[in-house]
Image (cartoon, rainbow, N blue to C red):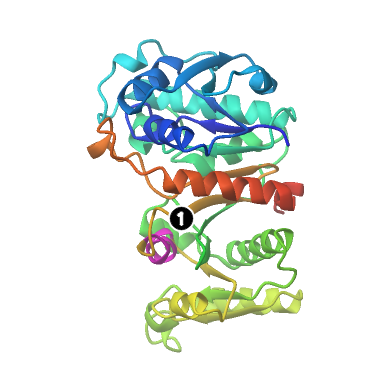
Amino acid sequence: MKPVLLTMGDAAGIGPEIIVRAFERGALAGCVVVGDAAVLRRAVAVNGAVMTAVVDAPADLADVPPGCLPVLVPAGLPPGLARLPQGVIDGRNGAAAARCIEAAVRWVQTGAADAIVTAPIHKEALSAAGVPYPGHTELLQALAATPGVAPPAVRMMLANEELRVVLVTIHLSLRKAIDAVTFDAVLQTLHIAHRAAAAWGQQRPRIAVAGLNPHAGEGGLFGDEEMQTIGPAVQAARAAGLDVHGPFAPDTVFMRARRGEFDLVVAMTHDHGLIPVKYLGVEQGVNVTLGLPFVRTSPDHGTAFDIAGRNTADPASLIAALQMARRLVAAGVAARPGD
């Protein structure tokens, strides 16, 4: 297999720390870190006696001595990142995080790497750097676009061993997210979720659809989106041969899926879908971007500025994201982008 690229995330957060701790646990075999070498060395100084080795390309991983953390330093990183305080929002860290993501995408697009795993970024730092995308998902979607062609339709999935949830809308205010729940958006999400599940071995995944309103609208008493938008999209998906059910009350459908009634849940908004997965334990959760022409996963937690640099961050979710990326590569999930 080709290397997996691991972007360092925001230098002021726990990304570099959990990368070093995962390496110490032997979980980064076959990985190359895309990041600032001095920032990684700062994390090494806090966390242990790991050595770093700067490489020029993913293929150089084969030449890295045992026990050394391979670091690919992209061009254009702001200087002095390791001297900036940890736990503080800074546009320079946001710019560096974006440069690392851009470099990783270029390498994976050339075929030099199999997948990208991203350590957490800070959305305010990204904005302070002038990056016109609110998060990883939107930035990766733009970077994956072919010039002159509409970017691929992508969706966020959060998954652990008990629950898999795909979102129709992600980083929008709730008022805007409700407007973004359209027939086309719901139907497209169902097709993307179905194709992804089929690629990892569930040829006919059982998909539950969570409603938007309390009790899924209760027949129009609490809102009519289920009747006017979500329900028709479910019926269209079923007519196309997908095993889709709902919309169901969002306060119970995740419990039903966890008990084995469904393989996936499609949720309308960010917090509807992510709260139940994260409640089961962020150390096991993995964020997967569906619809990209390459595999991308990440931990399901953020930069944790409050504990950055204290040597207390748990790398379990990062390790789970690496394991998921390898499984998805083996399954050929990114064989083609979502329509």
Where residue 62 sits in the image (x, y, percent)? 68, 22
Residue depicted at 62% across the width and 31% down the height: 105
**Considering only vertical position in the picture, is 37 above or below 169?**
above
Residue 260 image position (x, y, % from top left): 55, 79
Is 247 one of the magenta-colored residues?
no
Asked if residue 336 can be seen in this view, the reply is no
Q: Which residue is the extreme one toward the top?
A: 79
Q: Which quadrant: the C terminus?
A: bottom right
Tell me the amino acid under the disc marked 1.
Gly
- The 10 Å Cα crowd at callout 1, few under 14, some 14 to 19, many 20 or more, is many
277 within the magenta span: yes
Q: Nearer the viewer, residue 210 or 276?
A: 276
Residue at 53 percent of width and 15 percent of height: 53
Which residue occupies 30% across, 40% down?
304
Q: Where 198 falls versus 63 (above or below)? A: below
At a point 40% along the width and 83% down the height, the residue shown is: 215
Kindly report the secondary structure that dominates the magenta region of the rendered protein: helix
Q: Find disc 1 in the rendering and name its residue.
A: 285
For the N terminus, which image quadrant? top right
Give, as a single range, the part of the protein colored magenta. Answer: 270-278
Foreground pick, 140 / 178: 140
Query: Residue 219 at x, y = what percent?
Result: 45, 89
Q: Where, by quadrant of the figure, is residue 279 drawn?
A: bottom left
From this viewpoint, is residue 203 visible? Answer: yes
Q: Describe residue 295's horizontal placement relative to residue 20 as left or right.
A: right
State the SS at label 1: loop
Residue 169 to residue 108: above or below: below
